Image (cartoon, rainbow, N blue to C red):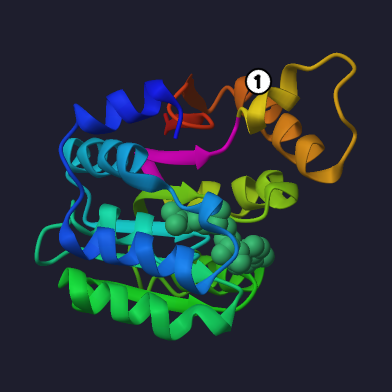
Amino acid sequence: MEDSLRYITEHSSAQTEALSWIEKQTHIRTNHGRMLTGAVQGRFIKMLAEALSPERILEIGTFTGYSAVCLAMALPETGHLDTLEINDELEDLILEGFRRAGVEDRITLMLGDARESLEMLRKEILEDRSRPEYDIVYIDANKREYPEYYGLVFDIVRPGGYILADNVLWDGKVWQSPMPQDRQTLGIARFNDIVASDPRVESVIIPVRDGLNLIRKL
Ligand SMILES: C[S@@+](CC[C@H](N)C(=O)[O-])C[C@H]1O[C@@H](n2cnc3c(N)ncnc32)[C@H](O)[C@@H]1O
């Protein structure tokens, strides 16, 4: 851990026992511990969400459930979080983490390609009117698909609601010159450009961890 991150972690509220368990199990049972939202950003999104008093949250990219638990902790008893994940091998670990955190009744895990799940949610919210719009959407799945996720979620976020997109600084690759032309960097760079020129939103990139784009739908 870098010295600055160690200092920040030691001088921020400690993570809960359930989150420590998810973090540890993620490192033991997957090779992708680096994808975890982690203690500092997890605390940040939980406190930010709490300040926004949401009833309905959507997450794109569950992984092992760390950020889903952080966001669910910000919900009232009546609130709900839907989280989308393509890797069904993670299901047991995700559900065990939700149970340990005591938030299993507040979360629905939707397994499958997020773009298909989003089409289904759009239909239920916009056409059938069988569920309400979201107050907060947290985007943290395939970096190549961020522009697509933005287009799919925009109409199902309520006016005044927030879209939070993680990893938007992409280790600084988005401002390198020449910019690396891999599809993940291109996806993030295009996403940031779309948001920055979208007159329908107010936005600011916060340099927490790998960058969080905080977008408010006007
Ligand atoms: C960076 S990780 C998410 C980290 C998680 N939010 C956390 O804090 O621990 C990205 C996740 O998105 C998932 N993913 C990638 N493409 C996806 C897609 N098209 N639909 C749903 N999930 C996807 C990956 O399987 C991976 O688990």
- Magenta residue check for 5: no
Taking the image as shown, residue 13 lies to the left or right of residue 184, namely left
> Residue drawn at (55%, 69%), measured in percent from left and top?
30
Query: Which quarter of the image is occupied by the C terminus?
Result: top left
Residue 133 visible in rendering:
no
Name the amino acid type tagged 1: Ser
Predominant secondary structure, magenta span: strand
> Residue drawn at (18%, 51%), measured in percent from left and top?
74
Rendering quarter of residue 66: bottom left
Query: Which quarter of the image is occupied by the N terminus?
Result: top left
Taking the image as shown, residue 141 lies to the left or right of residue 156, namely right
Badge 1 local density, few (<14 within 10 Å), some, or many (20+)?
Answer: few
Residue 103 visible in rendering:
yes
Magenta residues span 158-168
In this rendering, the answer to whether 77 lies above or below 188 is: below
- Which sits in the foreground, 59 or 161? 59
In this rendering, the answer to whether 62 lies above or below 71 is: below
For ligand 1, the image quadrant comes to: bottom right
Q: Position of residue 7 (x, y in %)?
A: 29, 24
Q: Position of residue 5 (x, y in %)?
A: 38, 28
Q: Position of residue 34 (x, y in %)?
A: 54, 50
Mark 1 residue CB less than 8 A from any atom of ligand 1: no
Identify the element where label 1 is drawn. Answer: loop
> Residue drawn at (39%, 21%), measured in percent from left and top?
4
- Magenta residue check for 166: yes
- Which sits in the foreground, 123 or 82? 82
In this rendering, the answer to whether 110 lies above or below 62 is: below
> Residue drawn at (75%, 32%), measured in percent from left and top?
190
Give the residue pinned by disc 1: 197
